Image (spheres, rainbow, N blue to C red):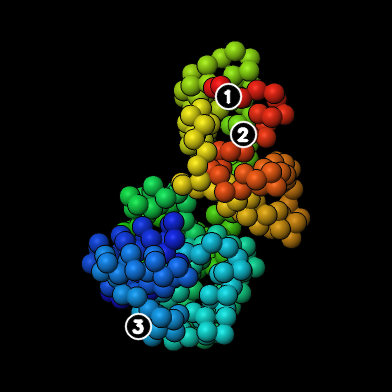
Amino acid sequence: MKVGFVGIGRMGMPMSKLLLEAGHTVYVNNRSQEKVEDMVTLGAVATSSITEITQECEIVMACLPDVETVESIFLGDSGIINSARPGQILIDHSTVGINTTKLCYDNAKAKGVEFLDAPISGGTERAINGTLTIMCGGDKNTYETVLPLFEIMGATIHHVGPSGSGTAVKLVNQLLVGIHSVAAAEALILGSKAGANPQQIFEIVNSGWGQSFMLARNAEVMINRDFSGDRAQLRVILKDLKLINELSETLGSSTPLGDIALERFLYAAENGLDELDPAAIVIPLEEESNYKINE
């Protein structure tokens, strides 16, 4: 099958590699030509424009970094939707706001084009291993058509309802990612400063009611103080928390802990931590506590 993939970055590259390895012909487009060249060496087909991808492929996927890029790539004059043909299937794996998903869906539907919001979760490692979580909103029959492609990239895959549902579930996920990241950081500081060994705190809490995925993910980073942004960046969580804040205000839904998480991530970013690992949210808390974990 010919599959188009727009945005071959930290997540998109391993996802498109898996499609190639499964025997599909993958047409790629990306702002950075270096990444396109890397994919071509693996067997992908480079394209010079979005129009070329929509001309060649019946299914076009995108995994893009932010709302502005998604709206430009999907809704721009030479974007995916404007150059799409009736019957094509467009899939957005990006994390955006509900309004952006609605705009894409409405514009695609007006052209007789199917649009699925199918955000992903699990990070780079799971993208490489093909074990992502994929939450999809949109037409059920269209979802079933592309499910074999999703199964190449993900291990936990759900159709969660009509258009926008995938985006909503992803934002709920990110709400907890933000809250649990802050909670894990303050808990590890508190316990360590009280005299407990941080590694033991993690191991014990991670086997009890206090466990969370973000504790399991961030504890090692905080204990080893390896805050390199190679795996993920704090700014991405901040971007998502801003989208959650917009949604909660639009719906009139109270998210007090989400608001606190947003404040903490915003403060961290304003203090130069935005390109570091999300676990670096611990650094301002350490400064306020006059204590550093494992130092």
Quarter placement of the C terminus: top right
- The residue at the point 43 percent across, 57 percent down is 11
Query: From what the image shows, is residue 66 above or below residue 25?
Result: above
Q: Which residue is mark 1?
A: 293
Query: From what the image shows, is residue 44 above or below residue 250?
Result: below
Query: Answer yes or no: do the residues labelled 2 and 3 have beta carbons within 8 Å?
Result: no
Horizontal and vertical percent position of residue 16: 35, 63
Query: Answer yes or no: do the residues labelled 1 and 2 have beta carbons within 8 Å?
Result: yes
Dot 3, crowdedness within 10 Å: few (<14), some or many (≥20)?
some
Q: Secondary structure at mark 2?
A: helix
Q: Which residue is mark 3?
A: 56
Horizontal and vertical percent position of residue 162: 53, 66
Q: Which residue is mark 2?
A: 282
Distance (Cα) linking label 1 and label 2: 9 Å
Horizontal and vertical percent position of residue 197: 52, 16
- Comparing marks 2 and 3, which lies closer to the viewer? 2
Would you say 27 lies left or right of 43 here?
Answer: right
Distance (Cα) linking label 2 and label 3: 47 Å
Q: Secondary structure at mark 1?
A: loop
Disc assigned to residue 79: none
Question: Which callout, 1 or 2, points at the residue further toward the start of the chain?
Answer: 2
Quarter placement of the N terminus: bottom left
Query: From what the image shows, is residue 130 above or below residue 142?
Result: above
